[in-house]
Amino acid sequence: MYLTLATTAEADDGIVQPDFHARGQQTHKLYQRVQSGRHLFLEGDEARHVYEVQRGILRLARVMENGRRQIVAFGLPGDVVGFPAGDLHHTDCDAICDTVVLAHSRRALENSDMDRDLHHRLMQAALKEICAMQDHFMMLSSRSAAEKIASFLLTLADRTGQACGPYVSVDLAMRRVDIADFLGLTTETVCRTITQFRKDGLIALDTAQKVIIRDLDALRHRAEPA
Amino acid sequence: MYLTLATTAEADDGIVQPDFHARGQQTHKLYQRVQSGRHLFLEGDEARHVYEVQRGILRLARVMENGRRQIVAFGLPGDVVGFPAGDLHHTDCDAICDTVVLAHSRRALENSDMDRDLHHRLMQAALKEICAMQDHFMMLSSRSAAEKIASFLLTLADRTGQACGPYVSVDLAMRRVDIADFLGLTTETVCRTITQFRKDGLIALDTAQKVIIRDLDALRHRAEPA
DNA sequence: CGCATCGTTGATCAATTTCAATGCCGGTGG
DNA sequence: CCACCGGCATTGAAATTGATCAACGATGCG
């Protein structure tokens, strides 16, 4: 169905960079390359690490037996993903483009003994994640497709947008079907809505993956109910 | 719109029970009654505590300027709610029935010095919360209303259901509009779907708030896409 | 008893899903 | 070099679903 020939990232060449904490306690920072399509972990895997995204984008998804999929989050640079519940991961995680993560031992999250700063930072990241998921709820609960897509584009622009003359350029690295599964829509509806935004002059598409936001205010207006 | 004459719980008679931790460090456990309709905190309030639900049900909601509301979570007994992002609460929280919470200082969450066990327990609760929100996503992303409601009833049955002869009895303490705002539906659709389940013999309604699940397997089947 | 709030049901309508076809592009192999 | 193929994106037309608007019933409370 959405099968991306997933091979594990374990096979990748990880860049190990042992690092010594200020207090002199050794922590292991494992920089890891994840090629596009490779997965970092799958639902049910034992959670050994949490991952701080450095570059690229991760995709966190839950898949039901019947094949339906919900994108739980996109892991953008700066995000920490892979928070465990119990000992296991509860989502699949793969890279939608070449990605670099910094792997932190799960113990660093659960135990403050090793590295107090890191522990605190990871915990704050978990709390931020809760807040981000609440934002995601607001997007999902929007009644209309246009509101969802507009909100999504704005969030993405805010997180990863590049100034582009007077406009903002956004890289839509994820596939349409990913956006659809993130927002609870179908691929077709995502396409049509984006097309409509284009026809209305709110955005321009260079390629399908390259969006130029031409009228930020108008787009913000579309993100709100009529 | 959904104005429940909200008066603050601060006015309530809290039951203060100072408690001494095993290690001899003093922690303050503040048992607090929250009457139905009273709020514990509002979005934007400074987050001083996180709350462990002992009895009753809390309602966590985000409200947009335009009045639309998303129920972010229901706080059932055993849940910890009110995880802050930054220094502030990012949801409103009120009780949908008389509720008792145990308030923990936010410092207990962020700092392990005071009480290591408590700190760890609260952090695990935050991680569990992330997982629960992912479950909520699956519910929201269901394409059909029947799937959402069936999933919701099953989750509630799992958390709070009472064996009732061969059946399971569930207390739907929340209003229909709460369920609707939780699942991204309208009140009318919630009603109609529940009625349909009743007509199909999956459930029986004693009162509007009292559901008897008569055919658990059939209900599970409805929670999946056709 | 009357009012207010909540729950239920009905009819209509707009929106999205669904099904189907076509276009687009990069990669691959002859 | 070019034709073909596969995956993804886009567009069209039809069908379905849930939202909306409206009315009515039930329940609890002063």
Image (cartoon, coloured by chain):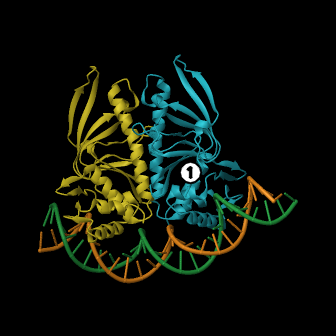
Chain colours: A cyan, B yellow, C orange, D green
User: Around disc 1, counting alpha carbons within 10 Å, would you say few (fewer than 14), some (14 to 19), or many (20 or more)?
Assistant: some
- The N terminus of chain B lies in quadrant: bottom left
Asked whether, in this view, residue A65 is left or right of residue A38, the answer is left
Q: Chain of mark 1?
A: A
- Residue A146 rendering spot, x and y as whole percentages: 54, 64
Q: How many marks?
A: 1
Asked whether, in this view, residue A59 is left or right of residue B127, the answer is right
The residue wearing badge 1 is A155
Q: Name the residue at 29% across, 40% down.
A: B52
Residue type pointed to by label 1: Thr
- The C terminus of chain B lies in quadrant: bottom left
Q: Is residue B84 above or below residue D5?
A: above
Q: Quadrant of residue B212?
A: bottom left
Foreground residue among A156 and B215: B215
Asked whether, in this view, residue B113 is left or right of residue A102, the answer is left
Q: Quadrant of residue B196?
A: bottom left
Residue B209 visible to an observer of this rendering: no
